[in-house]
Image (cartoon, rainbow, N blue to C red):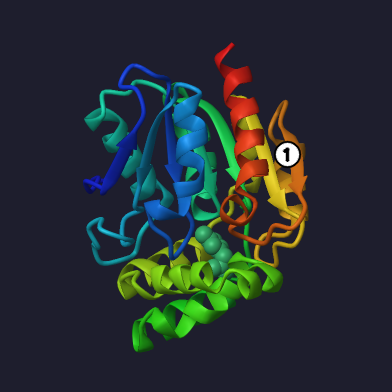
């Protein structure tokens, strides 16, 4: 097992509620989950959001990073919070961490909500190029492009303040953390492992996601035993932020069914 780092986390909701861990996308921090906090807490869940290593206020070890590293960080966070078993909601890189956790630490995972994610996301050369660019010029150089994948053009036009907030979130991500996660995605292939996931799983895709289009979600839902796919209209890659009501509704429905 990898050596964990102590990731930065924010916890809301009742201490004795069922724990839900929210794991975010490349270039984000725990604030990307702000729209989900109130709906989940209102239903009695204890919501644990965190910054992936190399992101936000978490430590930034030098790369390479592996999915084993991200899983070790997640399990250390659960241990720190006294949580034996948690529901895992992960978007994109967070979903990749979730799938890895479902395969390699099934006893700690009560359910998986896999949002806007992929089990294999090529082409590898694109990730290597993006990592090199960010190491050379910083994350500011990929921020505008990132926002254009995260939200639809209509959302960005109607919500310029939100678009700027998201742009600044990407630009504020440490270059080494962002680049090392690009290289992790470059090497990642979890397709053959998916049938080994035993946690109740829902896969949620954004109908307008240019980064992980719905066919990536379809592949996961077809391979994970008992999983189902929901495709949300009017959502690009950061679907939980652009369409918070619909994403929260589907996640809550899944959490409640896994709890019953
Ligand atoms: O930034 C992107 O291109 C989309 C993405 C892939 C993995 C992730 O977390 O975000």
Q: Is residue 185 above or below residue 20?
A: below
Is 70 left, or right, of 228 in this rendering?
left
> Which quadrant is the C terminus positioned in?
top right
Is 198 left, or right, of 17 in this rendering?
right
Query: Measured from the top left, where is residue 86 in percent x and y?
Result: 43, 26
Q: Is residue 222 above or below residue 142?
A: above
Query: Measured from the top left, where is residue 181 in percent x and y?
Result: 42, 63
Is 78 left, or right, of 97 in this rendering?
left
Report the residue at 35% width, 40% height from top.
Answer: 74
> Secondary structure under badge 1?
helix
> Does any portion of residue 32 appear in the rendered image?
yes
| Residue 163 or residue 226, whichever sits in front | 163
Q: Residue furthest top?
A: 260
| Residue 209 or residue 168, whichever sits in front | 168
Q: Which residue is mark 1?
A: 221
> Does any portion of residue 1 appear in the rendered image?
no
Q: Residues within 10 Å of mark 1 (few under 14, many from 20)?
A: many
Q: Residue furthest bottom?
A: 137
Report the residue at 52% width, 66% height from top.
Answer: 186
> Which quadrant is the N terminus positioned in?
top left
Query: Measured from the top left, where is residue 191 in percent x and y?
Result: 65, 47
Report the residue at 25% width, 45% height from top.
Answer: 4
Query: Measured from the top left, where is residue 233 in percent x and y?
Result: 77, 53
Report the residue at 60% width, 47% height from top.
Answer: 244
What count of labels does the image hold? 1
């Amino acid at each position: 097992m990898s050596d964990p780092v102590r990731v930065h986390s924010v916890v809301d909701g009742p201490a004795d509620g069922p724990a839900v861990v929210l794991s975010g996308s490349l270039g984000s921090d725990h604030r990307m989950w702000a729209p989900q906090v109130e709906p989940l807490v209102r239903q009695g869940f204890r919501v644990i959001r965190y910054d992936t290593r190399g992101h936000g206020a978490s430590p930034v070890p030098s790369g390479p990073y592996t999915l084993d590293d991200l899983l070790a960080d997640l399990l250390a966070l659960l241990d720190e919070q006294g949580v034996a078993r948690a529901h895992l909601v992960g978007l994109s890189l967070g979903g990749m961490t979730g799938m890895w956790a479902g395969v390699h630490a099934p006893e700690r995972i009560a359910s998986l909500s896999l949002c806007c994610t992929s089990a294999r996301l090529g082409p590898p050369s694109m990730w290597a190029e993006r990592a090199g660019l960010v190491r050379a010029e910083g994350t500011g150089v990929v921020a505008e492009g990132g926002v254009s994948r995260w939200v639809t053009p209509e959302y960005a036009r109607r919500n310029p303040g939100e678009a700027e907030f998201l742009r600044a979130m990407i630009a504020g991500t440490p270059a080494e953390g962002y680049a090392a996660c690009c290289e992790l995605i470059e090497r990642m292939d979890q397709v053959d492992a998916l049938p080994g996931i035993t946690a109740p799983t829902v896969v949620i895709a954004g109908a307008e996601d240019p980064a992980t289009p719905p066919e990536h979600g379809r592949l996961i839902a077809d391979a994970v035993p008992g999983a189902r796919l929901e495709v949300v209209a009017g959502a690009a890659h950061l679907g939980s932020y652009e369409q918070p009501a619909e994403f929260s509704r589907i996640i809550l429905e899944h959490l409640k069914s896994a709890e019953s």
